[in-house]
Image (tube, rainbow, N blue to C red):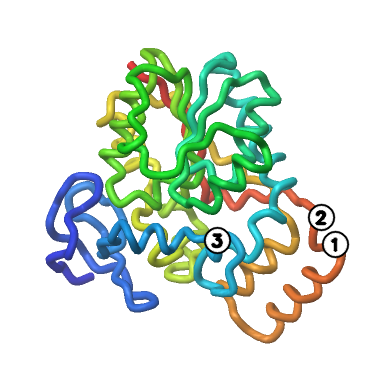
Amino acid sequence: MNKVASVVPCRLCGEQKGDVCFHKDGYTILRCRQCDLVYLDHVPHQESLRALYSAEYFRSSDKRLGYHDYQSLESSLMATFRVRLRQMAGFCPPGRLLEIGCAMGFFLRAAQEEGWSVQGIELSAHAAEVARRRFDLPVVTGRLRDAQFPAASFDAVAMWDLIEHAPEPVALMREAVRLLRPGGLIVLSTGDVESLVARLSGPRWHLYHLPEHLSFFSPVTIVQLLESAGLRVQQLRRDGAMYTLEYLAYRLKTVYPNSLTSLLFRALRKGRMGQWGVWLNLRDIMTVLAIKE
């Protein structure tokens, strides 16, 4: 691997140089020589982020970005979130819950059913409006640092599949911890770049979504991020998630585009079988639970 000066410093430790892992879709993926974080050598502008997470992101015709139909995933996502809520219950009883990056509010709705008092924040104006209109959820549109929530005002903070999107994950985590009461719980999920599937897949790994994913964590680097913000990790799990067959076919078509995968996706999209849910665990997605010290 070649050592290069990056356009942006490492998003975890600030190191200025990294090793080139590979190039994909016109972008460069680097590995920090100091802390080993794998990250995209690209600086997204705030306006480009807002444009990225528009309505089209949640019903996208671009096979590289977003979801082909996010709302069709409601039942499978709710099933996954109910499992995660049961995991949370072992560390924190229902109380005041903030979800950062709440999308259309499926997790918040599941949490309400379990007795949580919920609050969401979402960068996408479209998704936030769906959450408010459909579920009558208290969802703020915008960035966390602009929301001005009071310090220590939440018992738990959730970030599902979010931290890899954050241009400044250290600042985001510190702000999340500021909002958490002492002894409160932070839960998150993100891909494991050191998993067997990721290493065998190389640039074709299904979580190398560029340029929406900016950082790719391992167990070591995600723990480093959490501990640097004043958290003590309680569990790091690999439990998998519920997916529809249609969604799995869509992801397969994205990673391996050919006539066969396209035919499979079209067939599942037209029939009822496409909405069948299956629990899949490739052991390449981490769920982490951490307590504020």
- On screen, residue 64 versus residue 170, left or right, reads right
Question: Residue at the right extreme?
Answer: 272
Residue located beneath label 1 in the image: 273
| Residue designated by label 3 | 55
Q: Position of residue 166 (x, y in %)?
A: 35, 49
What mark, if any, has residue 276 been given in the picture?
Answer: 2
In the rendered image of this protein, does residue 82 appear above or below residue 30? above
Residue projecting furthest to the bottom: 259
Q: Is residue 122 left or right of residue 60?
A: left
Instruction: Tell me whether the residue at label 3 lies in contact with that at label 2, contact meaning CB atoms closer than 8 angstroms.
Output: no
**Left or right for 9, reference 277:** left
The residue at the point 33 percent across, 35 percent down is: 173
Q: Mark 1 to mark 3: distance in Å?
A: 26 Å
Q: How far is mark 1 from mark 2, CA to CA?
A: 5 Å
CA gap, disc 3 to disc 2? 25 Å
Circle 3 or circle 2, nearest the eye: 3
Q: Does any portion of residue 236 appear in the rendered image?
A: no
Mark 1: which secondary structure? helix
Q: Disc 1 or 3, which lies upstream in sequence?
A: 3
| Disc 2, SS | loop
Name the one closer to the observer, 262 or 53: 53
Task: Assign the N terminus to one quadrant of the image.
Answer: bottom left
Residue 195 in the image: x percent, y percent? 47, 52
Are discs 1 and 2 less than 8 Å apart at CB?
yes
Q: Amino acid at mark 3?
A: Ala
- In front of the other: 133 or 16: 133
